[in-house]
């Protein structure tokens, strides 16, 4: 009974991990022009323009994708742990 429950939890965690990893590929952080400072200095920045004309900040996007990847890795490790425990118990 416990092994079956662990298998179910493992499957749910695996689906969550898959969803989070898929979402991490879809995350984009739009480019925002930095404000001009008191000396009329305009800070430099990098933006990538996609085919739809949307400007994206590649560095902020990478940080956001890494955040989602961390959650996905946590869910995947929970799935592996549950699967391992279920195997030992059965």
Image: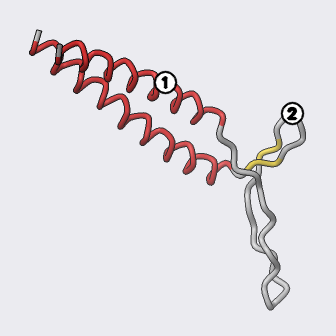
Looking at the rendered image, the quarter that the N terminus falls into is top left
Q: Residue at x 31, y 25 (%)?
A: 79
Image position, residue 43 (x, y; %) = 75, 73
Q: Quadrant of residue 24?
A: top right
- Rounded to the nearest whole Å, what is the CA distance between mark 1 and mark 2? 27 Å
Q: Earlier in the sequence, mark 1 or mark 2?
A: 1
Q: Residue furthest top?
A: 90
Q: Quadrant of residue 50?
A: top right
Q: Who is closer to the viewer here, 25 or 88?
A: 88
Q: Which residue is mark 2?
A: 51
Image position, residue 62 (x, y; %) = 58, 46
Looking at the rendered image, the quarter that the C terminus falls into is top left
Q: Residue furthest right?
A: 53
Q: Secondary structure at mark 1?
A: helix
Q: Who is closer to the viewer here, 57 or 24?
A: 24
Image position, residue 72 (x, y; %) = 44, 34
Q: Which residue is mark 1?
A: 18
Q: Residues within 10 Å of mark 2 (few under 14, many from 20)?
A: few
Image position, residue 6 (x, y; %) = 24, 20
Left or right of 46, for residue 80: left
């Amino acid at each position: 009974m416990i092994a079956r429950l662990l298998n179910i939890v493992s499957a749910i965690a695996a689906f969550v991990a898959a969803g989070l990893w898929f979402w991490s590929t879809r995350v984009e952080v739009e480019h925002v022009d930095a404000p001009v400072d008191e000396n009329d200095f305009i800070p430099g920045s990098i933006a990538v323009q996609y085919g739809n004309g949307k400007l994206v900040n590649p560095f902020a996007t990478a940080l956001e994708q890494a955040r989602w990847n961390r959650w996905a890795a946590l869910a995947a490790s929970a799935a592996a742990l549950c699967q391992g425990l279920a195997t030992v118990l059965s």
